Structure formats: structure tokens, C-alpha cells
Image (cartoon, coloured by chain):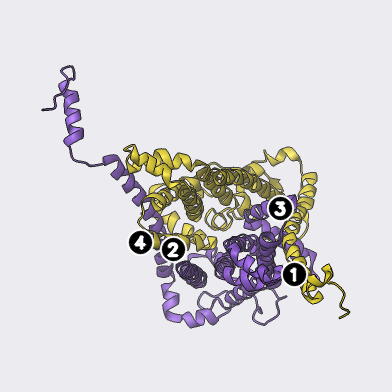
Amino acid sequence: MNGAALSVADFRGSPRRVRTESVFRGLFFLAALLSIVISGLIVASLLSEAISFISNVDIPTLWSSGGWFPRRGYFDVKTIVVGSLLVTVIGMLIAVPLGLGTAIYLAEYARPKIRRILKPALEMLAGIPSVVVGVFALTWISPELVRRFFDATLFNLVAAGIGVGILTVPLVASISEDAMRAVPQALREAAYGMGARKVTTSIRVVIPAAVSGLVAAFIVAVSRAIGETMVVAIAAGGTGGSRFTTDVLGPGQTMTAAMAALASGTDQVTGSGNAFQSLFFVGLLLFSITLALNIVAERFVRRVRQRY
Amino acid sequence: MTLSTPATLSPVAADVVRQRLQGRRFDRGGTLFRCLLVVMISITVMILVVLITTVIADGWSVLSSGLGDFLRSDLSSRVDRAGVAQGLKGTMTIGAIVVMVAFPVGIGAAVYLEEYAPRTLLTRLFDINIRNLAGVPSVVYGILGFSLFVRGLPGLTGGRSVLSAGLTLAILVLPIVIITSAEAIRAVPDSLREAGFGVGATRWEVIRTNVLPYAAPGILTGTVLSLSRAIGEAAPLILVGAVMGFFTGGSGLDVREPFTALPIVIFYWAKQPSTWQANTAAAIVVLLVVVLVLNAGAIFLRNHYEKSR
């Protein structure tokens, strides 16, 4: 101690603590930065092979070769895009009424006691792996529901679509319920004060107020349905390839199942050839579609947050 | 004084008014709507019940007669000899890799975003980027895993190995870990931080002694849920090259060996002739037990801590 006046440096604390502080700050920053690196790597890994695929095929045939048979050189993207759309539409026909009904009940009607039972059941459904739902679609939904009422083959797009719908029900329900719970109680009380019934309040006041969130729930569910792989790979029966079809009672192929089929089976992706590169092209297409949907959904979610 | 309807009001209208005022207060539309909602939610719950009961019923012959053998046996071309030992081993190993890689990195990123990050454009970019990553289909992560770990770093990962699979799934759940951990950290009251700063602690010391302990239950719930998500994933593993069919090995401790996992075993068996249906269902029961135990644990944890606050 030289007895001189204290300087700013004396208040900085021990050098060891300062060093620890900056080390941890740096580590945490790197962890956060990694997420950007991952995004970059996803795009990079898709892009290069997808570009070489595009430059190797005759582009008009991507929309008009009548079927998706990558091993034989038929890359009709229309087949798998339409397949994905069909499965998604069927899935939404299941997921929207079930998910929305569940959400309205949980947010507006259910007493706390019932809620405490229903919420975990819904979370349990959300936790069921998609491969399990796929097997369920093939061994139960297809024979017991679809083939009982329609003249369908064992592997069919309806069963796959219903399976995808089941997977997205908890998603639709939880996002929608959050949106409706975010609607201020004062709005409901105002409606009741004017003599509105519970049903009128729910349909004419709460739902319109929460509509941004409901739209977001729908878009997220569509994005999830398009990206769902295992249910379609198991229950839609498009192993190897599929002709162009809009017959939902027959087998079909989606973008995701096409990728799984390319990578599985006896002839796994070997690392060369057009069939291998088509995997990346379809992946890029899938990535772009779901990214666009997610960005739109995010807009809607933010609108809910800003309003209330 | 008696109430009378105006002379101009028709008898029909008077009846309607009388009915409205004196009639039974039964809200027909409202009851119908409520019934509709109950039907919707019943169907949702029924799906869960039917799924679980059919799976157990289908797999009962295997589960009741030789569960021990089924859990201990390797994959085989013969129905009566096939078991899930290799799949279970692969799934456990993948789970361990996810815990070791995704959890520290994800929680670290969440700490940075909530505690350190300045409100700049870069931070906003991080935020948007993570939300979008969470929506990327799992099969696309499979492509990333294939390009990065199988083809890109075969010297490190051994190619189509359980290490490649574990790292791929760690990347897959990373955004979920970050988002749920960030939510838990955001819920920590500022007064706790200020108390720490007030006694001269550095930011890291505040995080270590005040923020993380308080946020731990929330973080744990989110991470356990993301672990169960990783364990149930099959699509990325197909892309990374999980072995379908039977193979020898996969029982040692070498993470650079060929591998399979429970969801892959289920996928492969589901594509076999119907004689394999009991095995498929039994494997599903094993997977569901693992996943649902993890989920139930997470939900229990959350409810427990929600109540105690």
C-alpha cells in the first residue's frame, strides 16, 4: 500500500473475477452464435447439391414427367408437391375442428379441475412420436376407419392425412388456447354486461379478438404437416416412387416421404447420381416452403402480442 | 296497473314477447355449442386412448410371454428371436449425446440472449433465427447431419455412426432448448438480479448464484421435453444412415459404430409382413414407456414448482 488515492482500477475487482466474467460472456455468446452457424450450414448443405441437380436435369420434366421415380430418372416434382398438399388438407380437416374445439373448451368453458386432467392428456398426445402415429395410421386408421367406409387400398393418403392431423391437434389446440387466454377478461365482461350468452361471447367476441393467434396456429400446423415424414413414409405406401395421383384413397408420395424413401431401403443414398442429388433439391423446396410459412405465422403471433 | 301490449302489436308478436319473458330459460344454441366442443375434445382424448390400447393389445403376445428376452435380444431375421436391445442401446446413447451437447449449449445461448445481449440488430437476428430453426422439418436436419457429420467429418464421427445421429438430434432440439430456457430465465424476477449486483457480484456470479437456481425447474422441464422429442425422432436418423435390418455390434461403448434406434426399429418392422405386427407394437410400447415417463416427469416437475410459487 503506497497510501495514494484510490483509482478506478481499484474498483474493478480482482483480475481473476474480471477474467472469469469475460470468459463466460464469450462462451455464452459463442453458444448463441452457433444457432446462426447452424442456419448457414443448413442452407449451404442443401444448396450446392440442389444446384447441381437443377443443372443436370431437364427443367420442364420436373413438372410433367408423370411420376416420381428417382431411381429411373423421373423427377416429377408436381407428384410429390401435390401429394404433400393432399395430406396437409386432410390433416387440417382433422386438426382444425378438433384442435380449435379443444382450445375453445379449455380457454372458455372448462373448470380448473377438468382442465387439470385434459391439459396433461393433450400434452401426452403431443409427446407421442410420429413413427408411432404412423404405425397407428397403417394398422388401425386405415383398416378400421378408411377401408370400412371407402373402397381404399391398405396404403392410402387419407389414413396418412388423418395421422398427420392427429399429430398436429395438440399444436393447434395449445397455440389457439394461448391466443384466446390472452384476450382480456374485460372484453368478455363487456359482452356479458350487454346480455350476451356464453356462446355469443365465445364466437362473436373472443374468437374475433384472438383471430391473429388462431391464424398463426393454423399456419404453424400446416407447416408442421408439410414437414411431417414418418406417418406418410409408413402409411402412404410410396416406397420407391409414385405416379402422379390425386386419388386420396390410393397410395401416394409426399416431399418428405420421398426423401425418407431415397435415404432408406436396400439402396441407401450412395453419394452420387441424380437420385441422390434430388434428395437435396426436395429438401431445399421443403425448407423454403416451411420457412415462408413460419415467417408468416410469426407475423401473426407478434400481432397478438402487440395488441394485448 | 296491468301491463298490456300495444293495440297495434299482433297477437303472434305478443306471444313471442310473453314466451321470451316467461318461458323456460333454456339456452338451446349455447347447449348445442357446448356439446359440440365436448364431442371434439372427447374425440381427441379417444384417439389417445384407442392408440394406446390397440398398441398394447397388438403387442400383448410379445410383452406377456417374453418381455425380458425381447429387451435383451438383438435384431434378427426371425420374428421369434428379434428384440430391441440394439435399438434401446442406440436410443440411450443418442439421448446421452443430446444431454451432453444440446443442453449446455442451449442453456448457454439462452443465458446470453436473456442476460447479456444488448438490444441490437444482431440480437434480434438471433431471436428470429432461433424461432425459424424451431420450425425447420426434422427431415431437413437429417440432410444437415448427413452433409456435416457423415460426409463432412467421417474421421471424427466414423460416418454413419451413433455419434453422427446424436449430434444431428442435438442440433435438432437446440432451438427448443434455447426457447424454453430463455422463457424460464425471463421469468426470474429482476429484484433477484439487483440483489446480487447490489452486493457487488459480477454478472456471471449473479447468473450462477441467483438466476440459474431460480430458473432451474423451468429449464429442466423444457430440456426434458426436448429430450423426449429427440428420442422419438426417426426421420433424421434415416437420413444419417441408421441401420435397417439386422447387424452385429452396436453393443459396445464405441460411439463411432453403426447403429440403430428404437424409432428406426419400429419403422423397419412396420414395413415387414404382418407376422411382425406384434413385435412392432411391443417395440412401440417400449418407446412410449421411455418417452411418456420423460414427459410425465417434466409435467410433474412443472406442476410441482408452479404450485410452490
Q: Which secondary structure lies at badge 2?
A: helix
Work out how far the residue at label 2 is from the one at label 3, CA to CA, in angstroms: 37 Å
Work out how far the residue at label 1 is from the one at label 2, CA to CA, in angstroms: 37 Å
Q: Mark 4 is on which residue type?
A: Lys
Reading the image, the residue beneath label 3 is: B119
- Circle nearer the N terminus (1, 4): 1
Reading the image, the residue beneath label 4 is: A113
- Mark 4 falls within which chain? A
- Mark 3 falls within which chain? B
- Circle nearer the N terminus (4, 2): 4
Decide if residue B284 is on the left or right side of residue B153.
Answer: left
Work out how far the residue at label 3 is from the one at label 4, CA to CA, in angstroms: 42 Å
Q: Which secondary structure lies at badge 1?
A: helix
Can you name the residue that lies furthest to the left here? Answer: B1
Total labels drawn = 4
Residue B197 in the image: x percent, y percent? 67, 68
Q: Mark 2 is on which residue type?
A: Pro
Work out how far the residue at label 1 is from the one at label 3, CA to CA, in angstroms: 19 Å
Reading the image, the residue beneath label 2 is: A120
Work out how far the residue at label 4 is from the one at label 2, CA to CA, in angstroms: 12 Å
Q: Is residue A212 above or below residue B137?
A: above
Quick check: marks 2 and 3 in contact, CB under 8 Å?
A: no
